[in-house]
Amino acid sequence: MTDTDPVSAAAGQHAVIELRGVSKHYGTGSGQPVAAADEVSFAIEHGGLIALSGASGSGKSTVLHLIGAIERPDSGTIVNDGTEVTTLRGAALAAYRRSVGFVFQRYNLLPALTALDNVIAPVLPYRTGWDKAARGRQLLEAVGLGGRERSLPSRMSGGEQQRVAIARALINSPHLLLADEPTGNLDSRSATGVLDLIARVREENQMTVIIATHDPQIAARCDRLIRLRDGAVTDDIEIADGYPVDETIRRVGQLG
Ligand SMILES: Nc1ncnc2c1ncn2[C@@H]1O[C@H](COP(=O)(O)OP(=O)(O)OP(=O)(O)O)[C@@H](O)[C@H]1O
Ligand SMILES: [Mg+2]
């Protein structure tokens, strides 16, 4: 197919990620299973910056884990860039997981490894065809940690550790970055820095980013807000470019 082919032109307008009727239940040991995701449906265009909000237990992490294929839904389908995620098995599943960048609230760095080794840890078992250490250094530089390659996580601030985690999430040049409350453990200045960084790397790498967050300030910086309650989508709001942050916060109200 060529660029002018009408089929590929139409494909370019398709959502990059689409969830259709996705449900996931967890057993509670007693009584009814909890619907952590309840018939969740939404479609996200390439390059979007999406806030996934809702109270604690509303299903934000579950939805991110389902999209990243860390968990498998009980029913429904998830299509990412033409790949039916829910049916992947074995090597194809592992390759898909590696193709998605994940940033966690608690950084999840390996304490015994240096910053550089943490960044390249996801690719260490694989043949990449590129110089892992060189790319790791380049990424640390890009997140403002040039010169800190040999630092251990315990010698870094929370904001710095989250920067290392963002560099690690970028090691495989993902088209999709999933960030689960990436600023939840940070003071407001570090949180702003981490958010600025995510916005910048999204721009530079032309990524789609989905951020699970309680924080209306973060949601207000996104271009769309999807709100969950008890595993179900209750609101799906576009946030227009240039819309005043204060007004957005007033409109979206308390997210937590
Ligand atoms: N592994 C699991 N086993 C059992 N129940 C789970 C599991 N993971 C999530 N749940 C339940 O599913 C529901 C959704 O949880 P989830 O972690 O997705 O919410 P969340 O919106 O990310 O919450 P938070 O803001 O506290 O991180 C909750 O009721 C939770 O207790
Ligand atoms: Mg969560």
Image (cartoon, rainbow, N blue to C red):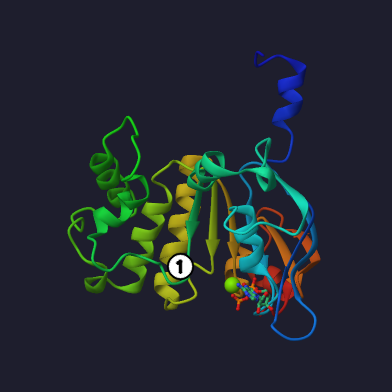
Q: Is residue 74 above or below residue 252?
A: above
Left or right: residue 129 versus residue 184 is: left
Residue 76 seen by the camera: yes
Residue 228 location (% of width, % of height): 74, 70
Camera sees residue 19: no
Give the labeled residue for mark 1: 192
In front of the other: 52 or 24: 24
Image coordinates of residue 120 in percent, x first then y, are 31, 49
58 shown above or below 12 = below
Q: The N terminus is located in which quarter?
A: top right
Q: What x and y, as percent, mark residue 119?
A: 32, 53
| Picture quarter with the C terminus | bottom right
Q: What residue type is labelled 1?
A: Thr
* Residue at x 64% of width, y 66% of height: 62
- Whether residue 194 sits left or right of residue 239 in the image: it is left
Image quadrant of ligand 2? bottom right
User: In the visual, does 156 lie left or right of 143?
Assistant: left
| 156 relative to 166, above or below | below
Residue at horizontal 70 percent and vertical 80 percent from the top: 254
Who's the residue at 43% across and 63% down the image? 194
Q: How crowded is mark 1: few (under 14 residues within 10 Å), some or many (20 or more)?
A: some
Which of the two residues, 246 or 173, is positioned nearer the viewer here? Answer: 173
Instruction: Please tell me whether mark 1 sits on a helix, a strand or a loop.
Output: helix
What residue is at 60 percent from the left and 60 percent from the top?
65
As drawn, the residue found furthest toward the bottom would be 30
Q: In which quarter of the image is residue 31?
A: bottom right
